[in-house]
Image: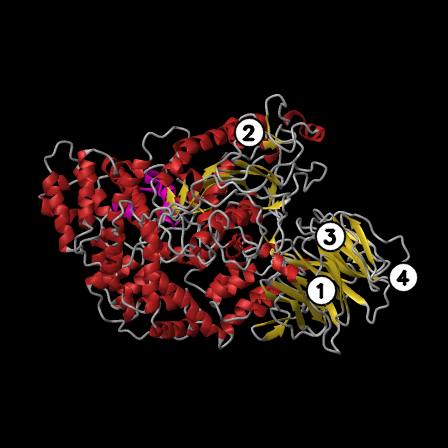
Amino acid sequence: MGDFREIRDALAIPNPTDPASVSRRRFLTWVGAGGASLAAAPLLASQFARAADFVGAQPIGADDGVLVLIQLGGGNDGLNMVAPVDSGRYRDLRRNLALDPGEVHRIDEGLALHPALTGLKQRYDAGEVAVISGVGDTQADMSHFIAMERWQRGVASRSIPWSGWLGRYLDGLSDAADLAGVAVTGHGVPLTLTGRERVGVGLSGGPPGWLVSDNVHERTAREMLNGYGSANHGLGSWGELVADAGVDGLRFAGQIDSLTEGLPEDDFDEEMVIAARLINANVGVRVLNVELGGFDTHQGQLYRHQGLMESLDAGIAAFFAELDPAYAGQVTVMTYSEFGRRYETNGANGTDHGIGSMSFLIGSKVRGGVVGGAPNLGAAERGSMVTNIDHLALYASVLGPWLGGDASEVLGADYEDLALFTGGPGAGSGAAPTPTGVPMPAPDPSAAQGYLLISSRGDVFNFGNRPSHGSSAAAEIVAAVAHPSGAGYWLATADGAVEPFGAASYAGSMAGTPLNGRIVDMACTADGSGYWLLGEDGGVFSFDAPFHGSTGSIPLNAPVVGMAGHPVGDGYWFVASDGGIFTYGPGADFFGSTGSLVLNQPVVGMAATASGKGYWLVASDGGIFAFGDAEFFGSTGSIPLNSPIVSMMATPTGKGYWLVASDGGIFAFGDAEFHGSGVDRGQRIVAMA
Amino acid sequence: MAQRGRVLIDPDLEAPVDRGQARHLLRRTGGDTRPTELDAVAVLSRGDAVDRILDFGPNPAWSPPRPADDKRGAHANAIAAYWVDRWATIPRPFEMKLLLFFHSHFAVHVRRMSEPRWMDEYLTTIHPRMLGDFGELVKAVALSPAMLSYLDNNRNRVGRTNENFARECFELHLLGANTYTQSDVAEAARAWTGHTIGDDGSYRYRADWHDDGDKTVLGVRRNWDGPELIDHVLADPALRVTAARHIVGRLWHFLTATDAPGAVLDAVAQVFVANSFQVRPMLRALLLREEFLTGIGSRPIPRTPMEYVADLQRVTGLRSGDVRPHQRLRQMGQMPFQPPSPAGWDDVSTFISASAFMTRAAYARLVAVRAQNGTTFLEGIPEQPPGDAALTALRAFGLDDVSAANRQLLQDYVAAQRGQRGWQERLNVTSTVALSPDAQVG
């Protein structure tokens, strides 16, 4: 518990800003920019005396979605919140921490809700709960601080300045109430709700007693303080602002007080009821953050997790009981935690920090069911559930469809909509057809509409509607990789210099560092925040990307020629010219190689499938070798080529690929479309993106 | 502390400060504006008044609490409590306001302090160097485990560079934005490789992590090591002016909540450079500027939360153990070791809001209750006529310059409430004066 509080406090930004201050701050910034005198400030400050009763109020629009985010601090054991309770593997791994199959609430996909989640089970049966299975961070970290920071920050690109994902959403609202973002907690505003321009309002359980009491002396003291609002202080514009904030504060105290009357005693229940009342008050709240801590169950897990699940269930029930039914079609509740826990118990009847976990999405417009299927207990990421749904894809699927925000702008990349809602916010049931299958978080589909060819001189040729973001002046470009968003790319030279374009950001290079072998390829992380360079000796250099190993110190039979990053996990593969495969890190499993075959022509490149559960190798004659879930769609192995094949790229669906020859010739297979080929004579194509 | 080089200051050092200037100088430097200190400063010349404020000699030894608890949050609380106590009780309180400036300038966050002792080591690194050689200060902070951890240089190694520190050092600590290129940052990051934290939690230089190749930084190619870059910036004829203007600008903004006028930047940066980046002569020049003493820098601005809680403790005589300011500073928006970003605390406007007022109101009431029950603060006022009682209270707060309107408001309040059943004059006067606009700006 103590740990959790510390983490929560450390991540909260102590900025108890209220509507007035946010707006005032904006005003002051404006004055500064215009070079005008601050003496004008009091005039605008008076605008905050609005007709609405509530300080900074503005009604919720009829089509506005509201999100209540429940932060489960400490690392929630998703595997016991939604358990594959009938799996023998589950019982083997969890042993005495396994849930009793006779007590759980069975749902779909062989999964069951924790016995304490009785209210949620009813909502699930009503089709109002989605279980987001295997949700996690593709660059997971097992530190509470770093993991929670990454969840709260929610960025695909580190180039987005320090801020939280819902804070950036608030920044993007053009006409929002000053109370649009609220942290219902006495512990400051979390990073989640901290934008660059707007910061959520932090509400503690209630105002200081003496500001709302009926005691005659406290009342007359408040009247005296109100007098400062109209006095002439001779303190200049700042003094006027301070005095006005005092008057607003006295009024605000009374309003907050009315929200906290007759609350249940348990903290989490209380905060969930305040959240519901804030929505009912119709003052323009769009996103709320509520916290429930204590999930760091390193010991005594069965008992402790039981209590936590009871609290969660009760808090959600209290919230919906308090929520005005008029808003039922506009409110969604979402849970998250910084990580899940290990499969196996530790020595103290608990579990240690893991990776993937489970999230709930709850509301009348939520498309009920299990998203992502039951966890595959045969696979493990650092001993725990594999991340198969990127938390950023979950954010994107809520930001756009539910909150009407610009997910791409907020997160810094595009993600495929997980189709979590039956309809947009508003009255009515919003029934819509159920989608088939569960989409993986995937790159911008527009990336499929074309391709880029990169020459050794650094020229970038675009085909289809794939835009070029610029060419490099560097000599001897050898590799390129597209940013996962499709809106940018990196180019690398043989000596390890790296140049970013578009959405790709620079994270370092080997320029100026002597290398044992020339750089031959590069790959980027699943979220595009970093990349690896690959040397011909099998040396791997990581830049804001995890290093899992290399063959840099091992003599190889054949030089290394190409690499691929895992599309979901943070591992990578690379391949030697003899078709030998080297696998490193989470997800990058071995699915086979041509290492034992005698090849007609050397292997020159590789590509991973969309799931990361397979890969293709391509040889210089265009021969294709498919492994794992990679399918064979054709090759040029039997066609005489003018120029050798130098690279390949899979389509985002994994149902096709392109091969490119050094003269720019393109060969498209499967669902890969042909958008043109060929480049100027004298240009040698080295890569494709 | 030795001063080297020429000292360039244009105002009339011999001119006497008037009472208003003395009050402004003291208040803005986090000092005591009650009659005794005000009387002592108001008779001095401008030069002597500023020298007195900058003379930290009379202050007791710096001895922050050692970590008694293995939790970083608890240790941050203990340091905050010590900070406020020291601010409220030492004879030359500017020392603690200046420490706040440097903490904001070289921001670090408790979130990354996996060893609680890094926090007091960090402050103890800054404290003795605040008025001395700025270059030595930047270098010492750069190699403190607190900074190494906060800006990730502990993970910066050859072949896996992390640019976080290299960038922020240029942008925030030394030069300011748009004065260097991305390539400078990438190359500087290589220079900073190997400066990390050892297994014992102390600074460690790892030669095997250091990039020994040549790097081109700010136009010079050589085998740079990180700290040499700081020396280079502060020695290069062009870069040192940029750096001086950056630091002076940050300091001016911290002290006045305004952007520095060009003349101030020019002149004070020149003093900084001429004095080989000694901080004391630069600060002295800044505080003696006419723009600071009587111009735009003398307009009232909001007191930051740290100043506010320290001032309430100073005037009432309460200690941190009595009122636990660290429990409120988070909500007020300025808890040590919890700056909102690597750029430190934001503009003072972020501290003014309705909910911030509620937090201040809760704290002021607590202070008033404790002062009434545990101190002699305002003990004589119930026997004085309302007008005298109001004046006595305002003087005790160091606010004897309060407007006639606000003084009348207080006097009328006392006059109206006296004789009412259950009236507690000291409690209510302390609360309402502490929450006056006058007590919240300075």
On the image, numbered disc 2 is attached to which residue?
A: A305
Whether residue A514 appears in this view of the structure is no
Q: Which mark is residue B91?
A: none
Q: Which amino acid, mark 2?
A: His
The mark closer to the camera, 4 or 1, is 1
Q: Which amino acid, mark 3?
A: Gly
Q: Please give the chain letter of the residue carrying mark 2.
A: A
Sequence-first tag of 2 and 3: 2
Q: Please give the chain letter of the residue carrying mark 3.
A: A
Q: Quadrant of residue A143?
A: top right
Spot the residue most to the right: A598
On the image, numbered disc 3 is attached to which residue?
A: A549
Residue A567 versus residue B325 in the image, above or below:
below
Image coordinates of residue B37 in percent, x first then y, are: 24, 55
Q: Quadrant of residue B412?
A: top left
Q: Which amino acid, mark 4?
A: Asn
Q: Is residue B332 magenta?
A: yes
On the image, numbered disc 4 is attached to which residue?
A: A600
Q: Secondary structure at mark 4?
A: loop
- Do discs 1 and 2 belong to a common subunit? yes
Q: Which amino acid, mark 1?
A: Phe
- Do discs 4 and 3 belong to a common subunit? yes
On the image, numbered disc 1 is attached to which residue?
A: A674
Pointer 2: residues within 10 angstroms few (<14), some, or many (20+)? many
Range of residues picked out in magenta: B312-334
Split into 4 quadrants, where in the image is the N terminus of chain B? bottom left
Is A197 placed left or right of A354 in the picture?
Answer: left
> Alpha carbon of mark 4 to alpha carbon of mark 1: how far?
27 Å
Pointer 4: residues within 10 angstroms few (<14), some, or many (20+)? few
Sequence-first tag of 4 and 1: 4
> Alpha carbon of mark 4 to alpha carbon of mark 2: how far?
59 Å
Given residues A238 and A79, the one toward you in this image is: A79
